Image (cartoon, helix red, strand yellow):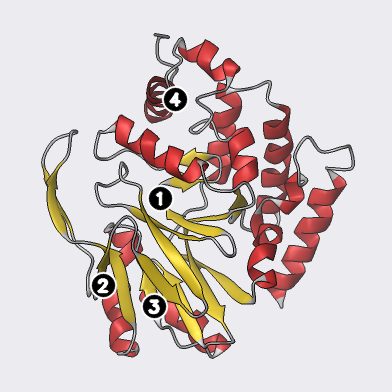
Amino acid sequence: MWRRRLGIVAQQVCSSSSRAVSTLRPPSIEGMGSRAAGALHRAGLQVALVPCCDDNYCPIVHHAASGATMVVDTPDGEEIKRALDERGWVPTHILNTHHHFDHVGGNEFLKNAFPALRIYGPKNRKVGYAAGGIHSEEIPGLDEPVSEGDRVQFGDFSAHVLEVGGHTDGHIAYFFPSVPMVMAGDCMFNMGCGRVFTGDNAKMQASLQKLKALPDETVVYCAHEYTTANVRFALEVEPGNLALQERAACVAELRAVGEPTVPTLLAHEKETNPFIRWDSPAIQLVSGASSPAEVFSFVRTWKNDGRKPLAA
């Protein structure tokens, strides 16, 4: 109940700052947080966004008509089980996006609690990163390794698996075209993207291009509440972007009342996320580059180092 009250307050506050004509379609208040999840409800899905650890989110999606329930990444098994038990939902799927502990740490706990649960994720691998070293990318309890082009059936819905490496080599996303929504993990954030631990910026840019190519109305679930820092950086990169200024106000107001800024709407990311705006004349000008890979690398280096690199 308290979450519902906060949601109402957040919507009222955000609405009050958006009485002027919005530069975004739909308006910014419709493209961030609980209001952005409307497509799931229209598709017959229920969703719980479970805060875990310091800043992780675990989306739990329930399809009442089939009884299927999916858990997207498992930062904290006990917290996730508590949320499931409160709702009387029995998980049927874990969809892992990548191997980092804050995404798979609860896999075995949940599998022990719910033995029929099936765990999907990228295949286990050992891989050399361009950044150096051999890295073991393993998903605990993996039942069903999946890769680009595979489908995961969830109730009446089918998830298309997209390989979106860069943050890790094997990172994947799950796109549900009939909603539409994408579980993006740490590839794309609300006005941000994951650090490129592999060191392969070209691969990360290509992965983000794959997500950017999805329909504008796609609801994007990312795995962290990083949006306050992300929007601050985005305004450094593109201070004249009016849509970005509008979203920044919404972020501040949602966070002031403890509301998530996740999920986000892809149409709004295309207008405000500096990591996928390599075609923006303003960002091309500040970077001195024009190719998508070069512009992306410039912006990612700027965020990593905390200072603007020299233009190309």
Mark 3 vs mark 4: in front: 3
Name which residue type carries label 4: Val
Q: Which mark is residue 144?
A: 2
Mark 3 nearby-residue class (10 Å; few <14, some 14–19, many ≥20): many
Say which residue label 1 marks.
186
Q: Earlier in the sequence, mark 4 or mark 2?
A: 2
Q: Which of the two discs, 2 and 3, labels the residue nearer the N terminus? A: 3
Q: Which sits earlier in the primary sequence, circle 3 or circle 1?
A: 3
Tag 4: Cα neighbours inside 10 Å, few (<14), some, or many (≥20)?
A: many
Q: Nearer the viewer, mark 2 or mark 1?
A: 2
Picture mark count = 4
Quarter where residue 125 is shown: bottom left
Asked if residue 188 can be seen in this view, the reply is: yes
Amino acid carrying mark 3 in the image:
His
Q: CA distance from mark 3 to mark 4?
A: 36 Å
In the rendered structure, the answer to whether residue 205 lies left or right of residue 43 reads left
Instruction: Tell which of 214 and 202 is nearer to you.
Output: 214
- Residue under label 3: 93
Q: Residue at x 44, y 25 (%)?
A: 299
Residue at 27% over, 47% down: 168
Q: Earlier in the sequence, mark 1 or mark 4?
A: 1
Q: Amino acid at mark 1?
A: Asp
